[in-house]
Each structure stands twice: as structure tokens, then as C-alpha cells.
Amino acid sequence: MTEPPEPAPPPADDDGDEQDVVEMHEPILREHAEPRDGNESIPVWLIILMGALLLWGGFYLARYSGDWRSDVLDENPHARRPLRAFTPAPVDPMQRGEQLYTIYCTACHGYDGRGEPGRYPPLGETEGVTGDQRVLAAIVLGGVEGPLEVRGEQYDEQMPAFRDRLHSAELASVLTYIRGSFGNEAAPVEPQTVAAVAQMMRARQRPWSEAELHLLREGLERYEDETEVPETLEEVGIEP
């Protein structure tokens, strides 16, 4: 007796197989493509925008460049002025002389120019101040040592030399100040006069004595103009 044939397998479920394939490929589909080197074309809208900006920039520079001139491109043209040579303001010798007198002279002669009896002579209404300005310049440049008689009184202190402390213009301002202050009304002293006296005294290093000042005054009387100064002290009979 023959065995009955085996039953045929059930037909395959096509939907189930398709579902299995999809589920199997899902991890692969979730992965992104590997990046690759390459060039991508520039968007057309970006090219148009860049071209428009270049055209606008060229028009703006051509319209407002002013040929690149500094006077046109200056942000504050009203502040520009033609350059002029600098001219310092003139200095009032009386004002400058008062400042220097306060610094260098008040310790001995006082703010009022009265000095100190027996030590420092007064500066007001004295022949040594209002007389020959060349003699006064020589005193300030070289200094003086006592005894010295001023307005009938003796003074025995020594005045230092200022030739190395102040230049000619400053000394002229001080002399102009004291000749125009403390009751004095003498003519001002020019820096050229002080410089000429300094040149005349260039070989002298010691302070003046009263006797030497008397000789200097007599020697300078031969020169009618007070601004005229001899080249050397020997010309007025004084040894350096």
C-alpha cells in the first residue's frame, strides 16, 4: 500500500516577505551618504547680488571720490587754515623782570626793593640803579663785594654773579624792572646791551669792588651812547 503524498507547503506570504526586507534595510536607510570632495555651483541669486554691489560701489566712488583730494575728503573742512609761520607773542620785560626778581632778588633786596640796613642796599632812587645801565649790567653779571656805600650808608655783603644763571634777555628784563620800579623811572635795558657788557667782561672772573666800579663808570663816560660798549675792559683802564 502506497504512502499518501506529503501535503504541499502553504503558499508563501508575499506581504510578509516584503515586510521582512523593509525591516532588514531600515538601519541602512537611516545612514546618510558619505560626504565627498567636490565643487558646487554658486547660486545664481548670489552672483546677481555681488554684481549689483560692485556696480553700486563703482558708481559711488566715481560720484563722491572728489579725485581723492585731501581738501575734499576732509571731514571737517572748516577747521583747515593755511599754515602760517609761528610768531611768539612779545614778552613784556617788566612782567618777566618782576617774575625773575621775585625768584632771585627778593631774598636780599626784598619785595619792595628796600634791602636790609647794613647788609643789602636799597634799589630805589639810587645812582647805581638809575645811572649808567652798562655799569648796572656789569654788577649783575659779575657780582660785587663790599664794603659799598649807597645813599650814605655802608653795606658789606657780597652779591653773587648771575652771568651763569640767567641769559642776556632775562637779565635785561630784571634790570628793566628795577629801573622802572621802587620809585625809579630810568630807561629800559636791551638784551643787546647786556650781551655786549658780558662780552667785554669775558676775561674777568672775580666780583667788582667799589673802587673798580668807580673806574668803570669813569671809563664808560667817554662813550656818549649808553648802548655803546667797548670790546675789552682794558679799553676803559681796568685789568680783568
Image (tube, grey):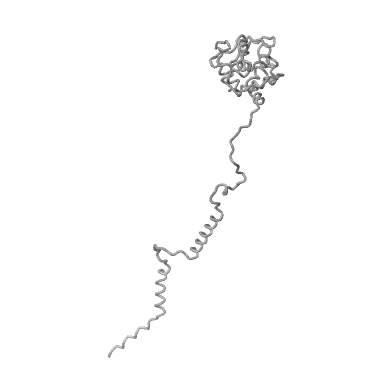
Residue furthest to the left in view is: 1
Give the camera-side residue of 136 and 5: 136
Q: Residue 88: give x, y in percent of width and height.
A: 61, 32
Q: Residue 201: give x, y in percent of width and height.
A: 56, 16
Compared with 73, 52 (above or below) is below
**Looking at the rendering, which quadrant does residue 224 occupy?**
top right
Q: Residue 92: give x, y in percent of width and height.
A: 66, 27
Give the camera-side residue of 146 and 240: 240
Total count of labels:
0
Q: Residue 77: give x, y in percent of width and height.
A: 60, 46
Compared with 24, 235 (above or below) is above
Quadrant where the C terminus is found in the figure? top right
- Residue in the image at 28% along x and 89% along y: 2
Residue furthest to the right in view is: 183
Compared with 74, 223 (above or below) is above
Give the camera-side residue of 21 and 118: 118
**Looking at the rendering, which quadrant does residue 23 occupy?**
bottom left
Left or right: residue 38 compared with residue 67: left
- Residue in the image at 59% along x and 38% along y: 84
**Looking at the rendering, which quadrant does residue 208 occupy?**
top right
Quadrant where the N terminus is found in the figure? bottom left
